[in-house]
Amino acid sequence: MSLKKTHLLLVLLIVSLYGFSQAFSADGQAVYVDPDSDFQSVMVRQFDGNLLLIFEKFNLESFTGDLWATMSSDNGLTWSVPYPIITSSDNERHPALLELEPGNLVLFYHKGAPYTFTDFRIYRATSEDGITWTEQGPINLGWSSMGEMNPSVIQDGNYITMTYNRAGGPSYIARSQNQGVSWDTNRTQVSDGASALPRVTKRESDGLYLVSYEVGIGNMELYGKTSNDIHDWSAPEVLITTGGTNQDSRPLALEGGAFMVAYAHQNNSDFNIFYQISVDGTEWSPRIPLTSGSDLYKLEPFLMHQGTPGHLMVIWSQQKGPVPYLDQDIWIHPDFIPHDYLEGSGLMASAAFVKPGNSVTHTVTLSNSGYYPLSVVLVNEMPAFSTYTANSLTATAGQYSYNPATTAINWNMNLNDGESESLSFAITIEPDTEDGTVITNIARFTDNLGVERTESATVMVDAAPPTTSILTPANGQLVTSSQVLVSGTASDSGSGIAAVQIQVDDGPWQTVSGIGNWSLLITGLSEGRHDINAQATDAAGNVQLLPEFIHFQVDTIPPFGNVEIYLPAITRP
């Protein structure tokens, strides 16, 4: 390793200890704050787990850009102080980044003279560590004249696939089989006409490519095209969004299979980041806000899978000073979850405890919170220690069934924006299930956007009966009144006491006042012996009787008859 490279590594290690961070908010946090204009960021997670972020630092006076980088070892919470990687008197901008294998980083960007828009070429640079970069020169895409710009790349099996546009012209797509050293020169056109900033993503499940790009000047619109053949883009282009100004689109194939496109949208004076979702790349949801606020320009989003299924990292350029573009910082949302259309859905059990042999009802609610009509498939397999309660399955809409072979409940449901439907069924707990067993019922939702959601509900088996005792009257006690206050205690270690009842002689069971400490005044008692029994019932339905009766004697009649008093004789001396 060279002395220069060793020095750079040492500097990075030192500055990373003091990496910039600030309080995280719903709209993200700044990666680093400086007085410069920072734009067009891209990011990869390296094979060692660290994040490498590259962005352009633009000088408005010289109208040139340089490429800088920063790293994070804690999933984007803190970052090293940015350092330059590609700098010159020329204009280097719009980076596109891949790590093809450990220690094999490749960077693409357009480069040209200041103040020009037609003499750009797309360049390639390489690095082993993300710190020291070597510019390899321009790539040949088959054009005799200059004008290629705005590259976007994805790793596509053994290929690198790139989209780019020609200055003032259409968008194109090309492929490389040797890590970007050479490219096909087919000049395959994607957009129907002039467009800018084409970005590409691919859905691996079916090999469907999506390219999004902007069209127009001023109030720009976003369009997209899909294809399973990189050399055939004859399908009609589809309008993704219109109204106001829409620019800087960035598509991503979500893990569930849907496509997401994020972009900067300006309505009146502010720019914010919005996104839309589509199952097939042709029908798109309405726009959904990703950032908020009306006083700062937020531009040029970049999307990347975060590592946890359904979670994304989003970076963008955000205005800091009072004038847009003069002072922009790179911001990040390190853990963004796209809108969950089923966020109001859930699974609930009718009781927290259940007695072995008894049933408990479960209710699934599907609620579409808006933006897009959904087709939802729900699967609920019977949990351990339970069976489906026959004829208990009902739903407010949709197709539903119980499959004895798989012991699963299936529900297919169509929900328009804002609609809500429910399904109910009961499970019966096996009679010999041990006390304290936790039974977890799981419902799995999958919608036509590819979003997967899991809801669960737990009940605990309560097989232990409660206990109760009578404190007053004492067993065998003589009571000299026609009424007596019967009192006692009750306890249960599981679901808790639901009720305590007592029975006097062969009379009806009467519910007492109180739970843990209870009492009941019994009136109108006849003379003689009386027996008292007590029983406690817990919330799961377990019942416990006293092992023996308590008896007492009522005697309210005083004794009667003659009383003779015999005095001793008095003898005088």
Image (cartoon, helix red, strand yellow):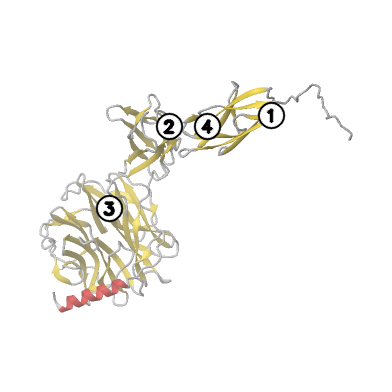
Q: Residue furthest right?
A: 572
Residue 98 appears left or right of 326:
left
Query: Residue 360 sits in which quadrant?
Result: top left
The mark nearer the N terminus, 4 or 1, is: 1
Residue 31 appears left or right of 116:
right
The mark nearer the N terminus, 4 or 2, is: 2
Q: CA distance from mark 3 to mark 4?
A: 61 Å
Residue 293 horizontal/vertical position (percent): 44, 61
Q: CA distance from mark 4 to mark 2?
A: 15 Å
Badge 4 is on which residue? 536
Residue 336 horizontal/vertical position (percent): 35, 55
Q: Nearer the viewer, residue 568 or 192?
A: 568
Q: CA distance from mark 1 to mark 3?
A: 80 Å
Label 2 Cα crowd, 10 Å radius (few <14 / some 14-19 / many 20+): many
Q: CA distance from mark 2 to mark 1?
A: 37 Å
Q: Are marks 2 and 1 in contact (CB under 8 Å)?
A: no
Secondary structure found at label 4: strand
Taking 329 as reference, is 340 above or below it? above
Q: Nearer the viewer, residue 216 or 546?
A: 546
Badge 3 is on which residue? 252
Badge 2 is on which residue? 355
Q: Amino acid at mark 4?
A: Ala
Q: CA distance from mark 3 to mark 2?
A: 49 Å
Query: Residue 342 sits in which quadrant?
Result: top left
Mark 2 against mark 1, which lies toward the viewer? 1
Badge 1 is on which residue? 483
Mark 3 against mark 4, which lies toward the viewer? 4
Q: Are marks 4 and 1 in contact (CB under 8 Å)?
A: no
Mark 3 against mark 2, which lies toward the viewer? 2
The mark nearer the N terminus, 3 or 2, is: 3
Label 3 Cα crowd, 10 Å radius (few <14 / some 14-19 / many 20+): many
Q: Quadrant of the N terminus?
A: bottom left
